[in-house]
Amino acid sequence: MNSSEKGYNSEHNYPDYPDYPDYDSSMTPSVPAAPTHTCTDAMCVFLATVNVIMMLLGITGNGLVIWIAGFKIKKTVNTVWYLSLAVSDFLFCVFLPFNITYMVKSEWSFGLFMCKLTSFILFLNMFSSIFLLVIISLDRCVAVMFPVWAQNKRTIRLAWVMVLAAWIVSAMLSSPAAHFRDVHTTYHRHSETICYYNYAYDEQHIAIVLCRFIFGFAIPLLVIIICYAFIIQKLKYNQTGRSNKPFKVMTALIAAFFICWLPYHIFNLLEINVKNSIIQIGQQFGTTLASANSFMNPFLYAFMGKDFKRKFYALWSKIESTFEEEARSTLRATSITNSGVHSSAV
């Protein structure tokens, strides 16, 4: 049975992002359900406030990283990675006000195009972030395991090619979010417009949720774990006096991503078979936590050290020093390993 045969069915109004309003499932299948709450309740006020704070911090922090990594310091492979991450997070934070407004008003006021675009941007941010973290992990692993090759082939141009490929694949995997997104105007006491996923079949919804989990979480996690295993094993036999801050920064970025996105995927997987208010509330909090990942990275660049208080008052310089230390550490690692290889050959 397709969507035209069913009409508008509340069961197909899946509460995926950014569907913050709840809907009354008791309405007849041919009539869209109206939102049952506004942002006067405590939970909605809390979520809206948190999202506003995240938006302000994300735009400011990522904008600062883009300025520093893009214009203030020398371009390196590492600055390409972190610049791309910052652009992804900045783009998402710029579009966050549309979803905050929807959360507060319980009505979509921005038309079909923005309904599709805001959902597309969320998943573009999710996929591009995790793919960039995978690239960073692979890059660090290659630099440690094959230092000679890395020193000769690890170029800024290759880094940009990999970033472009990651963005293209991310856009392809995010396109279903735009394709299935739709708007519908209800007519009860007064007209209200909602932004929702208009799946023709339940199988479409299941396939998309599983695809996001497999390609946007499970497989990247497996690749990153394998990279870490090789890196840790190699570092055990190559103890030097160089700083381990770059490794700590990478670890923090990856941990933050998976902690922020894990609840989102868990509740979406649960929602395939269980549809109730608890799952929907979990999805709302999961989506908010996932959004929080977009403002965390700049602060992780600055605060990954012992002198936390001093770094708080020197955010700019610490972000810049993180990027510079990344470049120095990678170059030093390849040089040290190369000298060891040449000594062994002699």
Image (cartoon, rainbow, N blue to C red):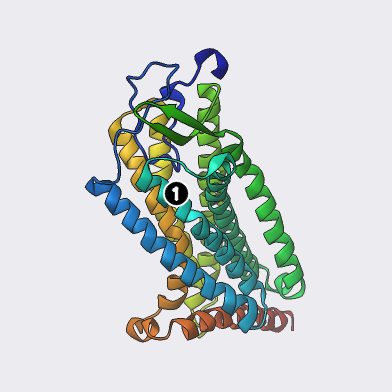
The quarter of the rendered structure image containing the N terminus is top right
Question: Residue 182 at x, y = what percent?
Answer: 54, 33
Q: Residue furthest front?
A: 190
Q: Tell me if residue 305 comes above or below residue 223 in the rendering.
A: below
- Nearer to us in this view, 243 or 60: 60
x, y percentage for residue 341?
Answer: 69, 78
User: x and y percent of residue 256 in the render?
Assistant: 42, 60
Query: Is residue 9 found left or right of 346 in the rendered image?
Result: left
Residue type at mark 1: give it: Asn
- Seen from the viewer's position, the closer of residues 221 and 51 is 51
Q: How many marks?
A: 1
Residue at 55% across, 22% down: 200
- Left or right: 37 as drawn, with respect to 131: left
Q: Residue at x 68, y 73 (%)?
A: 147
Image quadrant of residue 28? Answer: top left
Judge left or right: residue 124 versus residue 53: right
Instruction: Residue at 50%, 23% (x, y): give it.
Output: 202
Residue 77 drawn at (x, y percent): 66, 72
| Residue 227 visible in rendering | no
For the point 57% across and 79% down, the residue is 68
State the image quarter where residue 23 is shown. Answer: top left
Q: Quadrant of the C terminus?
A: bottom right
User: Quadrant of residue 284 in the image?
Assistant: top left
285 lies above or below 67: above
Q: Does dot 1 land on a helix, a strand or a loop? A: helix
Q: Nearer the viewer, residue 224 or 204?
A: 204
Task: Read off the residue under disc 1.
Answer: 99
Mark 1 surroundings within 10 Å by alpha-carbon count, few (fewer than 14), some (14 through 19), many (20 or more): many
- Residue 302 seen in this snapshot: yes
The foreground one among 87 and 339 is 87
